[in-house]
């Protein structure tokens, strides 16, 4: 009985550790200079149209082949977003399969960010330093 309780507690802690990151938490971390790696997995045209500051762009369709472009240790916290969260969830699975242990979704993804009228960075059609070729 005790073993079952301990196992259930471990599972609950693991689920909590992978819980989505609240937008307010991300904004606070950015302001404090302690933001995790922010990964935008939308298409490059969506990224150019407006993305969260300092986000790296690797479209989810390319992530399995290009995850090494992240350039971070596999234990670094990564927060992934797209428009609604569907592509971000797929990206989370891809990264976890590659051994990244702290991959979390941005709660509500870009839809929630826009709904809160938070700032977006807009890019020209030229590749930006944060867009990985």
Image (cartoon, grey):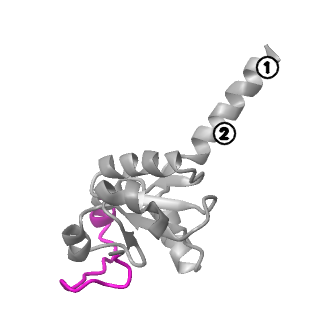
Residue 105 is a magenta residue: no
Residue occupying the far top of the picture: 1
The residue at the point 31 percent across, 46 percent down is 86
- Horizontal side, residue 73 vs residue 79: left or right: right
Task: Give the extent of the magenta segment.
Answer: 112-131
- The residue shown at (51%, 68%) is 37
Q: Tell me the residue at 79%/20% (across/down).
A: 3
Estimate the x, y position of residue 80 in percent, counting from the top left. 42, 58
In percent of width and height, residue 23 lies at 44, 62
Q: Residues within 10 Å of mark 2 (few under 14, many from 20)?
A: few
Q: Which residue is mark 2?
A: 13
The extreme front residue here reads: 65
- The quarter of the displayed image where residue 113 is located: bottom left
Numbered label attached to residue 3: 1
Q: Where does the N terminus fall, quadrant-wise?
A: top right
Label 2 and label 1: CA atoms lie apart by 15 Å
Badge 1 marks a residue whose secondary structure is helix
Q: Residue furthest right?
A: 2
In terms of depth relative to the viewer, which is nearer, 94 or 24?
94
């Amino acid at each position: 009985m005790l073993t079952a309780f301990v196992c259930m507690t471990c599972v609950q802690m693991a689920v909590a550790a992978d819980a989505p990151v609240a937008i307010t938490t991300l904004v606070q971390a950015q302001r404090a200079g302690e933001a995790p790696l922010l990964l935008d997995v939308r298409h490059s045209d969506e990224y150019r149209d407006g993305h969260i500051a300092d986000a790296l762009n690797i479209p989810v369709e390319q992530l399995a082949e290009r995850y090494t472009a992240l350039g971070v240790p596999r234990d670094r916290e990564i927060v992934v977003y797209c428009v609604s969260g569907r592509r971000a969830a797929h990206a989370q699975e891809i990264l976890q399969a590659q051994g990244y242990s702290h991959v979390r979704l941005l709660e509500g993804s870009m839809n929630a960010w826009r709904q809160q009228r938070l700032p977006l960075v807009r890019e020209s059609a030229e590749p930006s330093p944060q867009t990985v070729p």
